[in-house]
Image: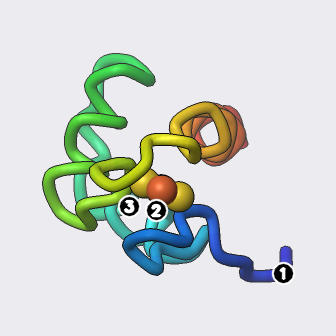
Amino acid sequence: MQNYTICNCKKVTYFDVEDVLHQHSDFASVEKAFEDVQKITHCSTGCGGCHDKIMDAISEIMSR
Ligand code: FES
């Protein structure tokens, strides 16, 4: 898996999202996981254009 920037506004990478998920493994749903990721990394608080990409990354990481 190669790292890449998911959120350009807040400079949040795929690995940043993965880190949050691994530290908050008790997430009940993708939506809840997104809230945690957003709270910690501030991703998707700029233009919001990365929202779907972040949701996709979370689903992918959670379904591994
Ligand atoms: S790219 Fe993530 S908020 Fe703009």
Q: Tell me the residue that label 1 is attached to.
A: 2
- Residue at image position (53%, 64%) is 7
Q: In this view, does 30 lie above or below 4?
A: above
Q: How crowded is mark 2: few (under 14 residues within 10 Å), some or many (20 or more)?
A: many
Asked whether disc 2 touches disc 1, contact meaning CB atoms under 8 Å apart, the reply is: no
CB within 8 Å, label 2 to label 3 = no
Task: Check disc 3 and give the amino acid type.
Answer: His
**Picture coordinates of residue 31, whole percent (x, y):** 36, 20
The C terminus: image quadrant: top right
Closer to the observer: label 2 or label 3?
Answer: 2
Percent coordinates x, y for residue 30 in the rendering: 44, 23
In the shown orientation, is residue 15 left or right of residue 3? left
Which element carries disc 3, helix, strand or loop? helix
Counting other residues with Cα less than 10 Å from the Cα at mark 3, is it few (<14), some (14-19), or many (20 or more)? few
Structural distance between the alpha carbons of marks 2 and 1: 13 Å
Residue 17: mark: 2
The residue that mark 3 highlights is: 22
Q: How far apart are marks 3 and 1 (CA)?
A: 17 Å
Which of the marked residues, 2 or 3, is nearer the chain's N terminus? 2
Give SS at disc 2.
helix
Q: Residue furthest right?
A: 1
Q: From the viewer's perspective, is 35 left or right of 29?
A: left
Q: Distance between the residues labelled 2 and 3?
A: 9 Å
Q: Residue furthest left?
A: 39
Q: What residue is shown at x 24% (from left), y 61% (from top)?
A: 42
Q: Earlier along the polypeptide chain: callout 2 or callout 1? A: 1
Q: Nearer the viewer, residue 63 or 16?
A: 16
Which residue is at the front of the view, 50 or 26?
Answer: 50
Amino acid carrying label 1: it is Gln
Q: Image point 38% across, 61% down: which residue?
A: 22
For marks 3 and 1, the one nearer the N-term is: 1
The N terminus lies in quadrant: bottom right
